[in-house]
Every structure is written in C-alpha cells, then in structure tokens.
Amino acid sequence: MFYLIGLGLDVKGISIEGWEICGKCEKLYLESYTIELPYKIKELEKFLGKKVIELDREQVEGEKFIDEAKTKDIALLAYGSPLAATTHISLVLKCKKENIPFKIFHNASILDAVAETGLQLYKFGKTASMPKWRGSYRPMSFIEIIKENSDIGAHTLLLADIGLNFNDALNQFQGALKKNKLKMGLIIVCSRLGTDGKNIVCGNIEDLKNEKINSPFCIIIPSELHFLEEEALGLKEKI
C-alpha cells in the first residue's frame, strides 16, 4: 500500500490516523523540496519514532520509489496538505494506472491557515509563487496573477519558494513592481502559521523591511477589504 500523508503545519500536526499508519510502514519518505520546514527533520523523526528518508524533486517526480508499494507499505510525507502541491496528483495517477493500492490523508495547509488573518477565503483568487531570482533569471509571472485577481476584486496569496528569505522577497517584489510600473499599498505577511512561532503583520513594503520574518512565510496582496476584514487586521480605526 502507498500512503500519501499530509503533515499539517507543525511537527505534531499529523492526524492520529496518519501517525498510526506511519508506525506500520516499512519506509517513510519525505518530500521537503517545496518548502522550508519550520522544524528540524530530527524532531519529526523523534515524534514519529522512525527514520525519515528525504527525497528531492527528481526522485519524487521520477515516481520510481512508489514501485516499492507493490510489495510493502510505504508512505510519502508532505508538509501541509499532500495534494496542495500540484505535482503530487501524478503519484496518485501512477497508483491507479498500475493498480497499486493507495490512501490519502489530508491535512491543514497554508491555503486554509491564511484565514487566521481575518481575510475571507472565498475572496482569494489564483495563488502565485515567487521564485528566487538568480542572475538574469528574474521571472515575474506572479505580477500578472496579482493584476488578474485585482481586476475581479480578489485577494492574492503569494508563496515564497524555498531558499528565498524575507528581505530578498520584498526586494524582488519591489523590483517587479517597478519593472511593471505598478504601485503597491498594504500587504500582509504570514510566517509559520499553525506553529507557536506564528506571526502576522501588515503594512507597506518599506515598513515591513524592519520586521523579522522567519521561513516559511507568504505574502498576501489584499483587494478591497470587507469591514470585518479591516477589523480583523486592526485597520478599522485607521481607515
């Protein structure tokens, strides 16, 4: 059997059922290339009571490790909810094509945890990613998604790729805005939601440069705010 198990947002965020399944699996694999975990893998191993084998993107997308599930129980652990990363659906499709028994254990992810800001989830549009710029590699497709969402009055969730620290993310954001001749007002930054170290701050880009933000983090570009959203963000008295 192949198990695809969401870890949730903290080291003890896995479901009871998922934790029990980990105990019976012969191998536990971990997909850790899509996000910087807010805890050490050793902490996860201690909680699960088992060794965890890290897989890189090539190994996960190569799908060969799933063949082991034809003869034994194995699991792939993924931070947050296991199908939030779109590439993971291909693992399920492989199981279906090759008649490999599988089961999915869903969990909390950043996609629902951002509701803690007070923003209404149904008002979010497309989610965008911000890659780390390297040399002449400076993708700005996230700007188009922000514009599309803004045009329909939707908030934008902007996810920072692994290896991109907060200050660099803000500088990249400013650079992309300048290149596209756009101005930005209030943005919201969420760090380590679902953990004891969670942090939610809002303000303009320059003001937020003084904030200490740990990974993983995300940036929200809000559209027009409902009065309850303003109140939740502490803005109602200021507007």
Image: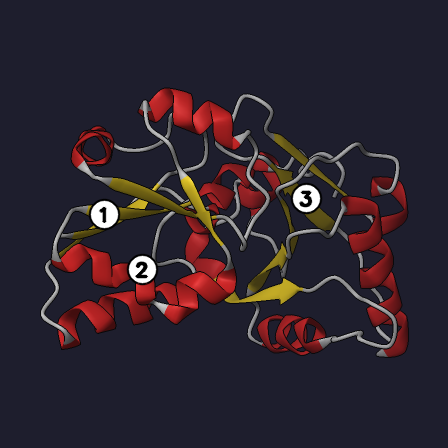
* Residue 60 horizontal/vertical position (percent): 41, 62
Does 129 sit above or below residue 164?
Answer: below
Precedes in sequence: disc 3 or disc 1: 1
Quarter of the image for residue 230 reads: top right
Q: Which colour scheme appears in the figure? A: secondary structure
Q: CA distance from mark 3 to mark 1?
A: 36 Å
148 sits to left or right of 135: left
Confirm whether residue 86 shows in the render: no
- The residue singled out by tag 3 in the image is 189
What amino acid is at disc 3? Val
* Residue 50 horizontal/vertical position (percent): 33, 28
- The residue singled out by tag 1 in the image is 74
Q: Residue at x 80, y 56 (%)?
A: 185
* Residue 14 horizontal/vertical position (percent): 32, 33
What amino acid is at disc 2? Phe
- The residue singled out by tag 2 in the image is 65
Circle 3 crowding by C-alpha within 10 Å: few under 14, some 14–19, many from 20: many
Q: Residue at x 74, y 44 (%)?
A: 239
Of 120 and 170, nearer the camera is 170
Q: Nearer the viewer, mark 3 or mark 2?
A: 2
Does 77 sit above or below residue 237?
Answer: below
What amino acid is at disc 1? Ile
Q: Secondary structure at mark 1?
A: strand
Q: Are marks 2 and 1 in contact (CB under 8 Å)?
A: yes
